[in-house]
């Protein structure tokens, strides 16, 4: 079994908080909100009433200029369509 130090050395976070996104993109929180309202920035993932994260892969794609908005999945009665 690997030691905890080995796990953290190879672990890459999949979800980023606002502070991390701001550091990566150089954008302010307000600018991120505005871009999200225009569907020009990746949507955030709501984990709780006060917890919001962003998918690291989508933020990286936004920075690379390869991100394109996708239609949200439709969920009906707990089944994704």
Image: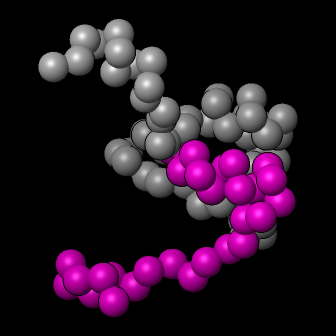
Q: Residue at x 48, y 33 (%)?
A: 12
The quadrant of the rendering that contains the C terminus is: bottom left
Residue range corresponding to the magenta coloring = 53-81
| Quarter of the N terminus within the rendering | top left
Q: How many marks?
A: 0
Q: Residue furthest left?
A: 1
Left or right, residue 22 beside residue 57: right
Residue occupying image coordinates x 35% and y 10%:
5
Quick check: 14 above or below 45?
Answer: above
Does 72 appear in magenta? Answer: yes
Q: Position of residue 78 (x, y in %)?
A: 21, 78
Q: Looking at the image, is 30 positioned above or below residue 74?
A: above
34 or 59, which lies in front? 59
Depth check, front residue: 35 or 11: 11
Q: Which quadrant of the view contains residue 66?
A: bottom right
Residue 35 visible in image: no
Residue in the picture at 67% in, 50% down:
59
Q: Residue furthest front?
A: 1
- Locate residue 38: give its quadrant: bottom right
> At which x and y percent is residue 51?
43, 40
Q: Is residue 30 visible?
A: yes
Tell me residue 74's x, y (percent).
40, 85
Identify whether 63 is placed above or below 79.
above
Q: Residue at x 59, y 52 (%)?
A: 57
Can you give x and y, in whole percent of width and height, for residue 77 in the image? Answer: 20, 84
């Amino acid at each position: 079994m690997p030691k905890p130090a080995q796990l953290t050395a190879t672990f890459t976070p999949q979800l980023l908080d606002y502070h991390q996104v701001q550091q990566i993109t150089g954008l302010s929180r307000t600018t991120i909100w505005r871009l999200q309202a225009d569907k020009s920035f990746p949507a955030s993932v709501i984990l709780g009433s006060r917890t919001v994260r962003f998918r690291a892969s989508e933020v990286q794609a936004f920075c690379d200029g390869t991100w394109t908005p996708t239609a949200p999945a439709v969920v009906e009665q707990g089944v994704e369509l």
